[in-house]
Image (cartoon, rainbow, N blue to C red):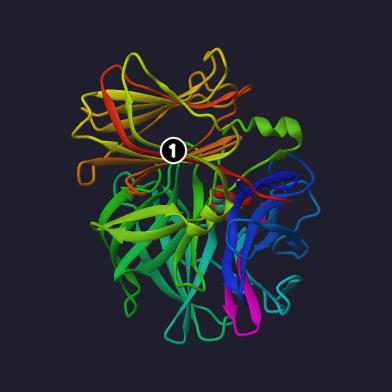
Amino acid sequence: MHFMTPLGWMNDPNGLVFHQGEYHLFFQFYPYDVEWGPMHWGHSKSSDGIKWEYLPVALAPSEEYDYSSVEQGHGCFSGSAISVEEQLVLMYTGNVDGRTPRQTQNIAFSKDGRSFSKSSNNPAIPTFPNEATEDFRDPKIWKKDEMYYAIIGTKKDGKGKAAIYSSQDLKDWEYRGIATESNGQQGDMWECPDLFTLDEQDILIISPMFGTKNSSPYYLLGNFNYDTCKFEQKDFFTLDYGKDFYAPQTFTDGKNRRIMIAWMNIWFAEMPEKNDGWAGAMTIARELTIKKNKLYQYPIVELNDYRVDSELVEDLQIDSKSSFNTSLTSASDVLLTIDMEKSKAEAFDIFVKCSKDMKEKTRIHFDLKQMTVLVDRELSGVGNKDNSVAPLSVNDGKLLVRLILDTNALELFINEGEYVVTNRVYPTNSDELFVIKSEDLLVIEQLENYSLKMEG
Ligand code: FRU
């Protein structure tokens, strides 16, 4: 069900945009190997944001600002897209290691949404500001009151920073200053910044680096002032508690929803799919909303159109003498409503993607005393083994759990997206899709399980 690269290597989602009735997803792409290489922009489109169709590569390294004939890092790095009347406009970072400046911001456009031309004015932003260093990349572009803006990630003096530029015509860009920078534990390089307003809240998403290590993206809640171009930080939250989630990007669609897609990996993850000639997948598109002053993320409702077989159980009681095993086996969308008042259990487990003998399994352990959930990949099969822990919350006496289970992926949503945990899992055998176990009484008011299927 998840979007994967057709071959080769894929990392960040780029240029997410809804243009002339179609969803576009571009991505950091190296077609010639399963490892990162000179970056291209792969391209795909969708009519519903779930099922994607591959299109020809949109950008390849070709110019002195994004190509080098010597063997060194170069290419069309991450960026974003905007729909401008008939045109689809991309803004991306051209990178050539060893050149000064190494990273510049560039424009490409398309009239048909299929083939793209790089602007003859490139680089559109040829230098980096004094407050930044040569790490200066990943422009995210938007429009507000007839003005275009771009936010660009950078660093200096051990701090991650987000620079703002504005332009009236997408050609001449004016530097407007650093919107905000890391304070304390927020990283020393900011990649893929994304700034938007949702329900009158200004939100800045950051994919941070600490030294040479990338870490879990987070979001800052605050206020962005368009006159001063300063972002005042008020609060700071983890975006996804899993280990395979990086470089998320958002966009709005024809229904005016704010949708986010992330790379469902992170740098230096093992990615055993390399043995099959590809590496990289994206999360399911998630709709963002604000509730209780926090960002919630939940699969866009179009995912429900891919539900085929279903299993519905009401008032399911589980204890030491009775566990629950599903009868469905393929990719699944599982929703549980747990009645916390009737349940006596202080903990329970959902084992997913298990072998028949239960030797191989991914354990999802719910601790109802500590109110945490642990995704334990120790026995998951091949691939990374590190665990994830996230908070749990109860809504009106109910614990709401949703699991999207795919061949190599597990997206877990607590309380309709208040907390999310995304991990890749690589079982060598997964005859048992999921099993629920509890020592003491666990009362599941409702269990819905749908097989997910995409034709073609
Ligand atoms: C984030 C990132 C970006 C960069 C791209 C290169 O994952 O490092 O900062 O533009 O990947 O592929």
Provide residue 424's location: percent of width, then percent of height: 54, 35
User: Is the CB of the residue bearing disc 1 within 8 angstroms of ligand 1?
Assistant: no
Q: Is residue 323 magenta?
A: no
Q: Residue at x 75, y 44 (%)?
A: 7
Q: Which residue is mark 1?
A: 242
Nearer-the-camera pick, 278 or 404: 404
Nearer-the-camera pick, 84 or 429: 429
Quadrant of the image occupied by residue 203: bottom left
Q: Is 220 left or right of 152, judged from the image as shown?
A: left
Q: Residues within 10 Å of mark 1 (few under 14, many from 20)?
A: many
Provide residue 45's location: percent of width, then percent of height: 67, 63
Provide residue 325's location: percent of width, then percent of height: 47, 25
User: Total label count?
Assistant: 1
Quadrant of the image occupied by residue 193: bottom left
Dominant secondary structure of the residues highlighted in magenta in the image:
strand
Q: Is residue 92 magenta?
A: yes
Amino acid of disc 1: Gly
Nearer-the-camera pick, 219 or 316: 316
Q: Helix, strand or loop at disc 1?
A: loop
| Residue 251 visible, this angle | yes
Q: Residue at x 30, y 36 (%)?
A: 338
Q: Is 166 left or right of 5, judged from the image as shown?
A: left
Region in magenta: 82-100
Establish if 147 lies above or below 315.
below
| Residue 214 visible, this angle | no
Provide residue 258's location: percent of width, then percent of height: 44, 65
Nearer-the-camera pick, 334 or 445: 445
